[in-house]
Image: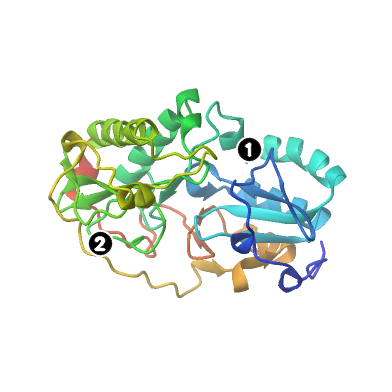
Amino acid sequence: MTSAPKTSPSETARPEETPYGWCPSVLRPMPLSDGLMVRIRPWMGTLTRAQAEGLADLASRYGAGVVELTNRANLQLRGLSQEDHAALVPQLDDLGLSRVDRSPSRRVNVTIDPFRAPGGGMDRLARALSERLSEARWSALPEKFGFLIDAGRVRRLDGIAGDIRIEACGDALLLRPDGAPNGLRLSDVTEAVEAALALAAWFIDSGAIGPDGRGRMAQAKAKGLTPPSALSGNDAPNPAEAPTLKGSAFLHAAGGTLTADALAQAAASGPFRVTPYRALLRFEGASASHLVSEEASWNNAP
């Protein structure tokens, strides 16, 4: 293992500052001044212990020797050569870290409240939505278009980007397009998934996507494009509250960057949730004290 990055991230532009209009992936790296950068979208926002160990090993052997954490709960490796990338992809396949990129749509951009209880309602909702979004038809969505699941009694992801938001209103689910203060009350996971997909289909058909393939929900609203009344509502989401990111449960990435050594040393305490706060959250079971999102009653339904 290396003990320091091979290339200091401060020497190059941050990925968020690049002018590119498309999103890098495992299969389609983005060229930056220090080499190629790949973006890894962990399925269900989770890293198993084996995946964390494997990713640390790959980060030490290829590129800049670091793993970056993004504000959409993704992971990035950078500073890769073409040869590095060719060698890296099959190993990420073996770790199960290219599942999104190998899906027919390549558009499973779902950010989930990392404080959710394992196996609870938000897990079921995220899994059902992610499986449907892997279908080829959703490749028509812009690459940056994303879904967000934040359906506890208190919203933890209020400041995190998400074009279609599934939240909670009291003990019911709520569908809310980004930029709208209120949303549509829903009864259960199945209805929420179908409504979210219907809203995505409306977005595709609305003319909100430009000829360059780009488009976001807030931009559609600014253009005066309004979802149909069947997908709109006047119910307000539950209140927002910023999470407390202190304690040994969190592995923070200073400046958004972890060295390979830091991830390797922490891997034994996995599995992890990849958070949008540039930190990994360790979780060990439903009773873990740092899983603080209080379950609304919709979560208790079978």
Q: How many C-alpha atoms fall within 10 Å of the one at disc 2: few (<14), some, or many (≥20)?
A: many
In this rendering, position of residue 125 left or right of residue 285? left
Q: Determine the secondary structure under disc 2.
A: loop
Q: Amino acid at mark 2?
A: Val
Q: Determine the secondary structure under disc 1.
A: loop
Q: Position of residue 72 (x, y in %)?
A: 49, 55
Disc ID at residue 190 = none
Can you tell which quarter of the image residue 131 is in? top left
Q: Position of residue 222 (x, y in %)?
A: 32, 53
Q: Earlier in the sequence, mark 1 or mark 2?
A: 1
Closest to the observer: 98 or 25?
Answer: 25
The answer, for residue 163, to whether it is visible in the render is: no
Q: Position of residue 239 (x, y in %)?
A: 21, 64
Q: Amino acid at mark 1?
A: Ser
Reading the image, the residue beneath label 1 is 98
Quadrant that contains the N terminus: bottom right
38 is higher (above) or lower (below) than 157: above
Reading the image, the residue beneath label 2 is 154
Q: Which residue corresponds to the image point at 60% horizontal and 67% vertical from the top-left? A: 256
252 is higher (above) or lower (below) than 32: below
Q: Which residue corresponds to the image point at 60% horizontal and 35% vertical from the top-left? A: 101
Quadrant that contains the C terminus: top left
C-alpha gap between disc 1 and disc 2:
32 Å
In this rendering, position of residue 229 left or right of residue 96? left
